[in-house]
Image: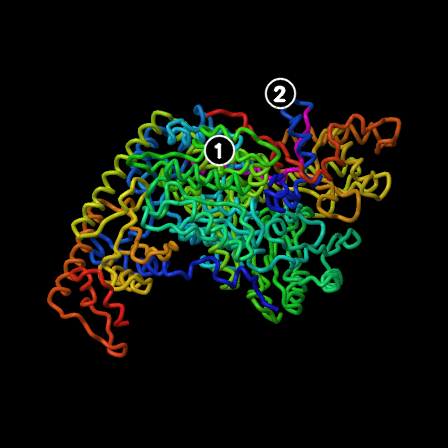
């Protein structure tokens, strides 16, 4: 008899993916300005390290919170004992107010409809347990966050079917793509329970347009399914057109007020949130599910027992987010810093002849177009390029294939998890690499190599100078 | 196509696998509606159904005040704020794992050591049990669990995992000791039902019994699981609540010392938590300690779904690394739990109420079999309602722990102050004296019509949505910050 469970022995946790190889290499040789200036710079981690000083200065001004005190009275004991899965009411109130503020108060949230979870990781898994059975599926637009393969599928047994998005329209979701995904699921005998989108998108770094959101609502309304909107990056939008939450669209649509005999669309739209990206606090494990569906809220609340938020953390954040002056300033200052940083990255890339997705306006990363640097329009070539960037340029970035992108040559590069100097160094290294590749391409003849004598050389980067005729592909 | 909620949502949501229909939680509702308070509501229901350790929070609070650098929010500790807030590695802070390993060893009298690399975090012991089950068993597989057992296991081990529980019969004839015969019978039942038994879960010290397992029983258990080649999960969440002889023996000690037993360490896993021993369930510190590398790796990946907040990890790393504090805390905690136990059981003994002989836990297993009209579940429920509504104490009926002998009740004593204990004893005394001849309701008294609870309805209401958490209302719920 097999000793462990199927879940323990399969690799649905997704960690054998190459996405994680880059992190392993980084761990072995991490960049440090002083101790290891030639090390690998981590650009594969979507963290927000730009605004800690704002949090620290708030803490300095609010000593009571640090001492587990409220109005000078110690509440340590009550906090230590507080394990109510409904969560600290003051924290939930502060959290929903914060969420509303990020949305310019164009959508508001009822604290009784929010469920606290151990990070968005747990929120997404919990929603799967609530909305789908083993063997059913959710549709996700590609490219998507690699962690979904674990969070949505591993322990739940739910499947993901891709909605193919392409660069032809900046990876926006289209109706034909949605329908195609639905048909693909049908062919695989999978019952589709809903669509899950990340808005703003990871890895694209873009906000969803109103028309995309309306398209999604129409689709789920017609097909009687759920829509999960992971809005974890909602506070990181730094450029127009600005963030539009799915909740805002729901509010605007008058056709949804007629419930009919079926479950209203309001009962089938759920938002996931977290403080890991907007506030830069991934260590605190603060996630949330928001739903107008009482049954989902009730079940998810019970399930949150498996991953409650530490009461100590709830208390700290209820005070912090309850300070409206602080949150107003934080949201706007954080966005300013992200904008500045993204511009640095974009201009650094531009110097190297590389462009970001032109609709980039959110997130802690850019979706970068390196298709012209591939020696062939294949994922093998993408992996080759990625490894070169990892080992020679010494940057860990995320290859598009790890995000299930259907077009080779796209990479996600993070810009908010390092100092400005480090980012500048990263851009310098990349620029040097690209210049050297071009130089080699100029002086070397086109390499005619047979399969046996083929070696990976920079001469393959002739692509840059020749027209894009994929002649190199014949050499493979 | 019109959809109702049943088609829209998963079976997991529609069913009652969450286990909250159990009477274990019903008594709390009575408390919620009428909670005892010494000045505001002296006639309210006293909560004795919650196994919390409130006896030592002053020690912890004192330590926190004297060690401001342990908090990342104080001027002394703020330097660490960003590194800690940013740290989401599921291995956990190394200093936290080291501190927990040291603490676990200390609570076992340093008779064994624990490897920090085998420590995996989880969302409380609740999360730890679920993750362990996900790692060891597939849907449809089963775990053997000796009865009586903690009602939460029905949810933690079964709800989302699809795993079943097979009870191992224990009864008062031998003080509920676990026997080989009972284990064999339960295992056989699994086989007869064509169910694959993947493991045995024991809680030592026991909830609800408050007893520790002796060496021979532990040895027998290790032999049994090796013979059957099934896993052994030991929930040692009450390890540091042992206050007197015969003392606590951890499964880790059997593995280390009893090398004469032929065994495979890969089958042994410990679930632990700081919720009971340290008295801070709100901080959600659960631990899985496995001797099986593959389980450690898998559980660690799964811990992404319930990591411990780094703010909490950092605080506790500091606290548990303070050797002097830990030694003093453990000694004082055991002393206070023991004292409280003696006061409570002494008071009960004077009234002719016996409890199972115990030396651990935050509760007693009270024997009220002589007070039930008939040895039936219904009679136990009737008596329980009387205790809640007449005596005004919330206790947990044995049936909610799957006990097959009606009349046993778990009564918690460590979640209140000395005065509340005296009041509880006084109420019991009054009741015993007043109702010597009329201990159970008869038709004349019409209990049912006075009841605010309707047990039947709640038990069979499949789509019940409890308006309250099973946890009683904390003052923080009413507080505004």
Q: Chain of mark 2?
A: B
Q: Is residue A405 left or right of residue B250?
A: left
Which residue is nearer to you in this view: B465 or B362? B465
Q: Which residues are magenta?
A: B44-65
Query: Tag 2: Cα neighbours inside 10 Å, few (<14), some, or many (≥20)?
Result: few
Instruction: Report x, y in % for residue A452.
Output: 27, 79
Does the magenta run of residues contain B315? Answer: no
Task: Report how many numbered discs are placed on residues in the image.
Answer: 2
Residue B40 got which mark?
Answer: 2
- The image position of residue A381, as x and y in percent, is 29, 64
| Vertical position of residue B115 compared to residue A277: above or below | below
Camera-side residue of B11 and A306: B11
- Position in image of residue B417 (x %, y %): 61, 32
Return the residue nearer the eye: B210 or B337: B210
* Residue sitting at x 32%, y 46%: A170
Residue, disc 1: A76
Whether residue A121 is visible here, answered yes or no, is yes
Place of residue B105 in the rendered image (x, y in percent of width and height, measured from the top left)? 51, 55
């Amino acid at each position: 008899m097999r000793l462990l469970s199927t879940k323990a022995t399969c690799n649905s946790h997704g960690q054998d993916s190459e996405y994680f190889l880059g992190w392993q290499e980084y761990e072995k040789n991490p960049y440090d300005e002083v101790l290891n200036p030639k090390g690998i710079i981590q650009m594969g981690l979507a963290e927000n390290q730009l605004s800690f000083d704002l949090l620290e200065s708030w803490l300095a001004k609010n000593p009571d919170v640090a001492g587990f005190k409220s109005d000078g009275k110690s509440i340590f004991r009550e906090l230590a004992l507080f394990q109510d899965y409904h969560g600290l009411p003051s924290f939930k109130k502060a959290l929903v107010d914060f969420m509303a503020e990020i949305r310019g108060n164009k959508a508001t949230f009822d604290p009784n409809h929010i469920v606290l979870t151990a990070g968005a990781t747990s929120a997404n898994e919990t929603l799967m347990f609530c909305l789908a059975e083993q063997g059913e599926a959710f549709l996700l637009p590609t490219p998507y966050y690699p962690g979904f393969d674990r969070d949505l599928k591993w322990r739940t047994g739910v499947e993901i079917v891709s909605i193919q998005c392409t660069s032809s329209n900046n990876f926006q979701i289209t109706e034909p793509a949605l329908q195609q995904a639905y048909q693909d699921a049908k062919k695989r005998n999978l019952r589709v329970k809903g669509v899950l989108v990340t808005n703003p998108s990871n890895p694209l770094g873009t906000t969803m347009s109103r028309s995309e959101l309306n398209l999604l609502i129409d689709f789920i309304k017609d097909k009687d399914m759920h829509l999960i909107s992971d809005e974890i990056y909602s506070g990181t939008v730094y450029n127009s057109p600005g963030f539009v939450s799915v909740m805002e669209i729901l509010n605007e649509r008058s056709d949804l007020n007629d419930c009919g005999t079926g479950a209203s669309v309001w009962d089938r739209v759920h938002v996931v949130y977290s403080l890991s990206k907007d506030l830069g606090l991934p260590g605190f494990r603060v996630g949330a599910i928001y739903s107008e569906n009482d049954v989902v809220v009730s079940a998810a609340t019970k399930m949150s027992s498996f991953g409650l938020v530490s009461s100590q953390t709830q208390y700290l954040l209820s005070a912090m987010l309850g300070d409206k002056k602080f949150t107003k300033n934080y949201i706007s200052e954080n966005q300013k810093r992200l904008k500045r940083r993204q511009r640095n990255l974009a201009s650094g890339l531009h110097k190297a002849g590389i462009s970001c997705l032109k609709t980039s306006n959110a997130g802690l990363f850019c979706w970068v177009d390196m298709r012209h640097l591939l020696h062939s329009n294949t994922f093998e070539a993408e992996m080759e390029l990625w490894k070169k960037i990892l080992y020679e340029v010494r940057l860990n970035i995320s290859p598009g294939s790890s995000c299930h992108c259907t077009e080779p040559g796209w990479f996600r590069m993070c810009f908010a998890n390092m100092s400005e100097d480090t980012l500048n160094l990263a851009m310098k290294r990349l620029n040097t690499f690209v210049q050297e590749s071009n130089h080699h391409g100029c002086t070397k003849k086109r390499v005619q190599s047979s399969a046996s004598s083929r070696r990976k050389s920079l001469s393959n980067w002739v692509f840059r100078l020749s027209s894009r005729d994929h002649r190199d592909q014949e050499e493979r | 196509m019109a959809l109702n909620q049943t088609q829209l949502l998963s079976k997991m949501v529609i069913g009652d696998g969450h286990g909250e229909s159990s009477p274990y939680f019903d008594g709390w509702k009575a408390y919620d509606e009428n909670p005892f308070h010494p000045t505001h509501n002296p006639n309210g229901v006293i909560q004795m159904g919650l196994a919390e350790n409130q006896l030592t929070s002053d020690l912890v609070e004192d330590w926190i005040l004297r060690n401001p650098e342990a908090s990342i929010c104080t001027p002394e500790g703020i330097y660490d704020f960003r590194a800690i807030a940013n740290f989401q590695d599921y291995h956990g802070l190394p200093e936290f794992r080291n501190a927990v390993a040291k603490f676990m060893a200390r609570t076992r009298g340093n008779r064994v050591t624990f490897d920090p690399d085998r420590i995996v975090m989880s969302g409380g012991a609740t999360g730890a049990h679920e993750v362990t089950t996900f790692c060891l068993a597939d849907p449809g597989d089963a775990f053997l669990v000796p009865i009586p057992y903690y009602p939460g296991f029905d949810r933690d081990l079964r709800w989302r995992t699809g795993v079943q529980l097979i009870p191992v019969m224990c009864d008062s004839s031998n003080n509920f000791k676990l026997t080989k015969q009972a284990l064999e019978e339960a295992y056989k039942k699994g086989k007869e039902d064509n169910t694959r038994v993947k493991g045995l879960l024991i809680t030592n010290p026991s909830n609800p019994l408050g007893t520790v397992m002796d060496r021979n029983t532990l040895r027998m258990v290790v032999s049994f699981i090796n013979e059957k080649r099934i896993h052994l999960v030991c929930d040692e969440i009450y390890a540091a609540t042992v206050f007197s002889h015969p003392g606590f023996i951890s499964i880790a000690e059997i593995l280390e010392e009893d090398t004469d037993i032929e065994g495979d360490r890969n089958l042994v896993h410990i679930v632990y938590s700081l919720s009971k021993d340290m008295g801070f369930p709100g901080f959600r510190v659960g631990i899985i300690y496995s001797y099986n590398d593959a389980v450690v790796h898998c559980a660690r990946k799964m811990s992404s779904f319930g990591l411990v907040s780094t703010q909490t990890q950092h605080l506790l790393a500091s606290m548990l690394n303070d050797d002097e504090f830990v030694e003093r805390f453990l000694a004082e905690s055991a002393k206070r739990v023991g004292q409280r136990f003696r006061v409570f059981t002494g008071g009960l003994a004077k009234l002719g109420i016996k409890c199972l002989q115990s030396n651990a836990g935050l509760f007693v297993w009270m024997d009220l079999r002589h007070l039930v009209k008939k040895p039936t579940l219904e009679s136990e429920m009737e008596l329980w309602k009387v205790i809640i509504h007449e005596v005004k104490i919330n206790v947990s009926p044995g049936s909610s722990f799957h006990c097959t002998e009606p009349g046993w009740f778990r009564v918690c004593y460590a979640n209140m102050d000395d005065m509340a204990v005296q009041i509880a004893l006084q109420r019991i005394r009054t009741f015993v004296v007043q109702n010597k001849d009329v201990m159970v309701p008869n038709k004349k008294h019409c209990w049912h019509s006075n009841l605010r609870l309707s047990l039947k309805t709640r038990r069979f209401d499949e789509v019940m949505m409890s308006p309250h958490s099973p946890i009683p209302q904390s003052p923080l719920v009413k507080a505004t910050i």
